[in-house]
């Protein structure tokens, strides 16, 4: 039993022979970019404005600091930071120290973070002191993790600024090894961790930068939380570094923060989730900021309706690019040369000619061309298994290594993918993924809850919200259940938006709770309301 499932040797060889996997590590990648784009600005946030040379030097200092503080090659380090320039020095510092960042998102709380720490046997947890009205040091206080490094005021923990800058050799890093762990949206009881290698991820970064047309003159606004796969690498901050572009870190994606930055920094490209795209569309006409520098608005993470996509050019004055990706690997983009209609209705086509897409029916058999089915995929940057999850890997992957995405799609003759729905027990709350089973398990821990089923409720703004159907044994209220989940340290976006008490659940033919019937009940109720 190993921690992760490597690519089979014959596939690895093929991906190297095709020039996809180049043997570069993240540490070397940044050094190479710094040599090439030395005096250009790499990253800007509220307090900093660093050139590529400075970013590189800071990452090296950070690496030595981590080494001096006992971080060794292969160690896992949970990183939970807002969008700040230091995110890059910390993450590249960890890469150069040979350590594996585990990318938590800012809304995660004790429930998620303690799981990431224990499941990975993390050596350290890296946070900012406060962000978004939350004091991350109080979360750190409750964790059982050897070290806590804090950006800002450390409280009783270790200040990142104090990490001694030792010198000496940094470790050699193997480009085919795991570089970091990303989070999966998941559909099961506990979140899954996604091991990505230097080789596979850098391939997706280089190609994404190219597909999205990034150049040294591009300015990329990191609006979504930068630890997520979309703003990290599609093309995201890493794609921007690859191209020598400038990164602008936004503390929030709302129009009042993001629009000012777009105007000030002459941002050319950014990526948002559909509800934000709607908010931007609705705000643009009323707001004074000049958004004329924007060439491309990328939208992904959840389905962006064709009607909304068609509003982007007339109302925001830029092109829209649909992005359908997953932290497990596969990313699809509409291309700049695609006709407007295709861009409006499709979620794009894959990055690589070697991305293999199968669309299958419930029995796992390929559907007829153009028909809807579940998407299975395998390729040069799609994982072969989750981290330390042997049992789950048996169901999440086919025996020949395809990842079961749980997405229902159809493929157009052009190769573009249209997302039609979902076969997994997950709620996509405006791009934030909620695993039904995880929330159900927490609800079941409440003494008054006999059974719980969490399903998606359609929502005009978020696309979907969460609704928990609950069978209670003793009287309990919805606010009490929500409070209970918060106390258990569940991230706020996973707290059910709606709780419906029922006496029993509808059943499927084999006696399982029928989520489909529950969803239908909800839709009927919402229609009446
Ligand atoms: C991105 O990654 P994850 O890992 O948070 O979520 C992946 C899932 C997909 O399996 C699909 O269910 C959904 O999110 N999804 C979309 C979508 N983009 C993602 N569903 C419909 N339309 C889309 N455009 O969400 C992600 C990773 C990289 C780039 C972009 C998004």
Image (cartoon, helix red, strand yellow):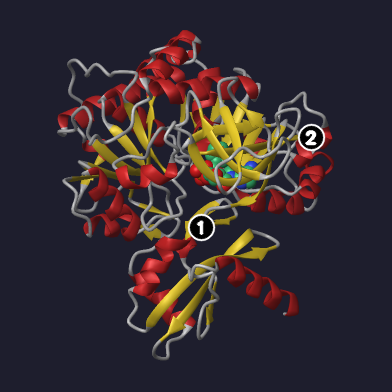
Q: Is residue 23 shown above or below 270?
A: above
Q: Is residue 326 shown above or below 475?
A: above
Front-most of residues 69 and 123: 123
The picture places residue 8, in percent across and down from the top left corner, at 37, 22
| Label 1 beta carbon less than 8 Å to ligand 1 | no
Q: Which residue is mark 1?
A: 425
Q: Residue at x 27, y 54 (%)?
A: 114
In the displayed structure, does residue 520 sit left or right of residue 201? Answer: right
The picture places residue 370, in percent across and down from the top left corner, at 73, 37
Q: Residue at x 26, y 25 (%)?
A: 98
The picture places residue 134, in percent across and down from the top left corner, at 39, 59
Q: Secondary structure at mark 1?
A: loop
Q: Are marks 2 and 1 in contact (CB under 8 Å)?
A: no
Query: Which image quarter is the C terminus in?
Result: bottom right
Q: CA distance from mark 2 to mark 1?
A: 29 Å
Q: Is residue 294 shown above or below 523?
A: above
Q: Which residue is mark 2?
A: 342
Ligand 1 is found in the corner quadrant, namely top right
Q: Categorize mark 2 by other alpha carbons within 10 Å: few (<14), some (14-19), many (20+).
A: some
Front-most of residues 135 and 94: 94
Front-most of residues 192 and 313: 192
Res 413 quadrant in image? top right
In the displayed structure, does residue 436 sit left or right of residue 490? Answer: right
Q: Is residue 179 visible?
A: yes
Q: Secondary structure at mark 2?
A: helix
Query: Which image quarter is the N terminus in?
Result: top left
Q: Is residue 224 visible?
A: no
Q: Residue at x 59, y 34 (%)?
A: 358
Res 341 quadrant in image? top right
In the displayed structure, does residue 228 sit left or right of residue 529? Answer: left
Q: Which tag, 2 or 1, sits closer to the chain's start?
A: 2
């Amino acid at each position: 039993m190993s921690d992760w499932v490597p690519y089979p040797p014959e596939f690895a060889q093929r991906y190297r022979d095709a020039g996809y996997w180049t043997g570069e590590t993240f540490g070397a990648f940044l050094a190479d970019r710094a040599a090439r784009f030395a005096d250009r600005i790499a990253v800007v946030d509220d307090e900093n404005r660093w050139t590529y040379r400075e970013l590189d030097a800071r990452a090296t200092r950070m690496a030595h600091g981590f080494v001096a503080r006992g971080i060794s090659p292969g160690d896992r380090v949970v990183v939970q930071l807002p969008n700040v320039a230091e995110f890059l020095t910390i993450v590249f510092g960890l890469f150069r120290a040979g350590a594996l960042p585990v990318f938590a998102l800012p809304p995660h709380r004790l429930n998620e973070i303690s799981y990431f720490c224990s499941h990975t046997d993390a050596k350290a947890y890296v946070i900012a002191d406060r962000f978004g009205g939350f004091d991350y040091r109080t979360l750190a206080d409750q964790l059982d993790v050897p070290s806590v490094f804090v950006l800002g005021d450390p409280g009783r923990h270790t200040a990142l600024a104090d990490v001694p800058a030792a010198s000496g050799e940094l470790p050699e890093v193997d480009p085919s090894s795991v570089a970091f762990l990303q989070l999966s949206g998941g559909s099961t009881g506990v979140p899954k961790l996604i091991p990505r290698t230097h080789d596979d991820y850098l391939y997706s970064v280089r190609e994404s930068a190219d597909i999205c047309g990034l150049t040294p003159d591009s300015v990329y606004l990191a609006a979504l939380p930068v630890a997520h796969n979309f703003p990290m690498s599609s093309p995201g901050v890493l794609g921007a570094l690859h191209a020598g572009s400038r990164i602008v870190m936004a503390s929030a994606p709302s129009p009042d923060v993001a629009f000012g930055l777009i105007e000030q920094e002459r941002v050319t490209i950014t990526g948002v989730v559909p509800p934000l795209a709607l908010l931007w569309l609705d705000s643009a006409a009323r707001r004074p900021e000049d958004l004329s520098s924007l060439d491309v608005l990328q939208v992904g993470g959840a389905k962006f309706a064709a009607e909304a996509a068609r509003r982007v050019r007339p109302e925001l004055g830029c092109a829209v690019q649909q992005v359908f990706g997953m932290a497990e690997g596969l990313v699809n983009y509409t291309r700049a040369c695609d006709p407007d209609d295709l861009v409006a209705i499709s979620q794009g086509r894959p990055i690589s000619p070697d991305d293999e897409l199968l669309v299958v029916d419930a029995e796992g058999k390929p559907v007829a061309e153009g028909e809807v089915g579940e998407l299975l995929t395998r390729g040069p940057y799609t994982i072969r298994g989750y981290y330390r999850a042997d049992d789950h890997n048996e169901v999440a992957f086919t025996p020949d290594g395809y990842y079961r995405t749980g997405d229902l799609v159809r493929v157009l003759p052009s190769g573009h993918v249209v997302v039609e729905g979902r076969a997994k027990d997950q709620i996509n709350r405006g791009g934030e993924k909620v695993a039904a089973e995880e929330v159900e398990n927490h609800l079941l821990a409440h003494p008054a809850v006999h059974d719980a089923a969490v399903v998606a409720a359609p929502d005009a703004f978020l696309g979907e919200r969460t609704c928990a159907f609950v069978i209670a044994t003793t009287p309990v209220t919805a606010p009490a259940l929500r409070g209970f989940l918060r106390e258990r340290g569940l991230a706020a976006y996973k707290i059910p938006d709606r709780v419906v008490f029922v006496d029993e659940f509808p059943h499927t033919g084999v006696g399982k709770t029928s989520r489909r019937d529950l969803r239908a009940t909800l839709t009927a109720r919402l229609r009446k309301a």
